Amino acid sequence: MESINLQHGSGGEKQTELLNNLIFKNLGNEFLDKKHDGAFLNISGKLAFSTDSFVVSPIFFKGGNIGELAVFGTVNDVSMCGAEPKYLSLSFIIEEGFSMEDFQKIINSIKIASEKAGVQIVTGDTKVVERGKGDKIYINTSGIGVIYENAKIGIEYIKPKQSIIINRDIASHGMAIMSEREGLKFDSEILSDTKNLNFEVKKLIENFGEKIHFLRDATRGGLASVLNEITSESNLGIHLFEDKILVEKQVKSACELLGLDPMYVANEGTFLCVCDDEIADEVLEILQRVNHHASKIGFITEEHAGKVIMESAFGGKRVVNPLIGEQLPRIC
Amino acid sequence: MESINLQHGSGGEKQTELLNNLIFKNLGNEFLDKKHDGAFLNISGKLAFSTDSFVVSPIFFKGGNIGELAVFGTVNDVSMCGAEPKYLSLSFIIEEGFSMEDFQKIINSIKIASEKAGVQIVTGDTKVVERGKGDKIYINTSGIGVIYENAKIGIEYIKPKQSIIINRDIASHGMAIMSEREGLKFDSEILSDTKNLNFEVKKLIENFGEKIHFLRDATRGGLASVLNEITSESNLGIHLFEDKILVEKQVKSACELLGLDPMYVANEGTFLCVCDDEIADEVLEILQRVNHHASKIGFITEEHAGKVIMESAFGGKRVVNPLIGEQLPRIC
């Protein structure tokens, strides 16, 4: 079976061949087709710009793969700025010997994912490194989006009494990856939540504009990390209701088996929204139409500034600390 | 000595610490300081967007390092669109065990390089992979620039009789890297040409606007590859004068020693400009103010469409073929 070799990254004919047969053929559009080192874009307004390198291992997992993740990850980061993602760059670092068939599968996933999210790949780069200097494939995507005119998203707009709403149950991406790595089997499979969130965000901003104050996807470090970032940057406190934070049964089992706290496990299609309390029920209703596990998990408070406090169903309280040290490497 | 470990890429407190102490502290600006996953930009006009992953080995070399290269490489790609580079994203893939001191040096180079080029790092990402799954550090930068109003750059504007001008002698970057790898010593050191080209481009567009038809830096694959791209995409021919293409003495020696043709060796601060013949002397004069090796190396022709022909000082002619196969891996 054919595989990627150093020639495919040398800037010569072999590279041109690879780009023409695989990348331009599958991902081509009016911008990419120019084959310039940069893309020429017509875009106006306030922009959001974001980048992420994806090093997830394994590269194929239940519910997704590194290609899909690379598209949706950046689409989501741009979305969380209150922006409509428009254009992506795409850059590969491939290890010599990587299977051409797997590369094709990944390109195909990138194609489908970008169509699904309504974004265009407009510029790219391919590098090949020697065997043992990489791990199959790493992908960087950077994204540009146009900020919605009525969006006003920022940690500085977070104030006491605002509600915190999450769009679904947590920890499935991290546990899908870990189950794959550890070879765990459950009654029902754990699927990664890898998903584009741009259309949910669009709906929220369209409906509620400036009443949506903050958006963030709970990726590396999980929900706990995002919440701690909020309290640390805003110098406010967060009060959580433990029984409102949902974890699917098989995900919970996997966490217990591996001694992991789902609050710190990475997600890929899970985001939280901080909004005025008066619209919380409506926000929830909109998000529940997509996933019935959407939930109002807590609120912002002046009390215990800088801390995230979780209240259990029985009224007990505990601090949710920031993640210290490594939990799950190469989860995204 | 302290080194990077997997915790620095986990999304937890160790990562926050690294980002605060090293990245935000050195590269901070109004955009990056927001510490959001994406940056909010105010920008208008037609934009250029480009991306590159840098995997150069060794990461430190005479005349530059991977950090500087990552900034200037993308600054140049954006410039070659006829645009003024404004904002960069910055994404690291670091191998576990990488020296913290070297990382600091690289961050410092990135700081200096971005100041020199007048661009801001506005968003970023840091991933850490296990030992043996990377090679010290890989860096991706993506860049956004604003296309000059009077620029009209594109392969479609290339026509017969236009002049081809290069801003300096060739092959020094590739040979600086190779000398480092092979431990070659020469009377005078070979320095990489790593350099930002945005100010030269600005001057050309300001002075000559639509009379500049095409710009391209001759990176991977060298000058021969760029020229062959032009002939292949435009379906025109190129006529070169061998004695106008300068190679410094020690670079030539190194090429001979390693059996390499300088026409195919990578550059990092070398670009060519295709312009109307009537302005060729003025373009040359402007470029020679920066580097006296700037030279008019040839012209576009209807003859031998799709081919690059080089005429020697003695009138002999040969075809400069596209690069086939690998010449120098991990040169950028």
Image (cartoon, coloured by chain):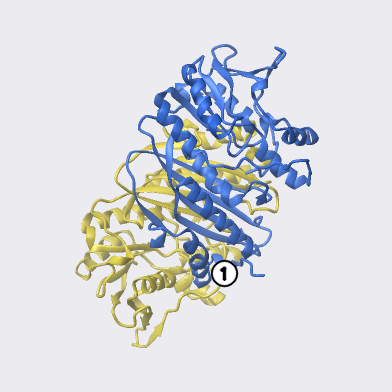
Chain colours: A blue, B yellow
Q: Nearer the viewer, residue B318 or A93?
A: A93
Q: Quadrant of residue B16?
A: top right
Residue drawn at x 49%, y 33% as measured from the top left: B36
| Label 1 Cα crowd, 10 Å radius (few <14 / some 14-19 / many 20+) | many
Whether residue A308 appears in this view of the structure is no
Residue drawn at x 76%, y 36% as measured from the top left: A254
Q: Position of residue B66 (x, y in %)?
A: 53, 53
Q: Nearer the viewer, residue A135 or A315?
A: A315
SS of the residue under disc 1? helix
Q: Position of residue B98 (x, y in %)?
A: 65, 47
Q: Is residue B211 left or right of residue A50?
A: left
Q: Is residue A30 left or right of residue A305?
A: left
Q: Nearer the viewer, residue A199 or B134?
A: A199
Q: Disc 1 marks which amino acid?
A: Gln
Residue drawn at x 22%, y 59% as measured from the top left: B208
Q: Residue furthest left?
A: B278
Q: Position of residue B138 (x, y in %)?
A: 57, 52
Q: Nearer the viewer, residue B47 or A243?
A: A243
Q: Give the residue at mark 1.
A: A7
Q: Quadrant of residue B284?
A: bottom left
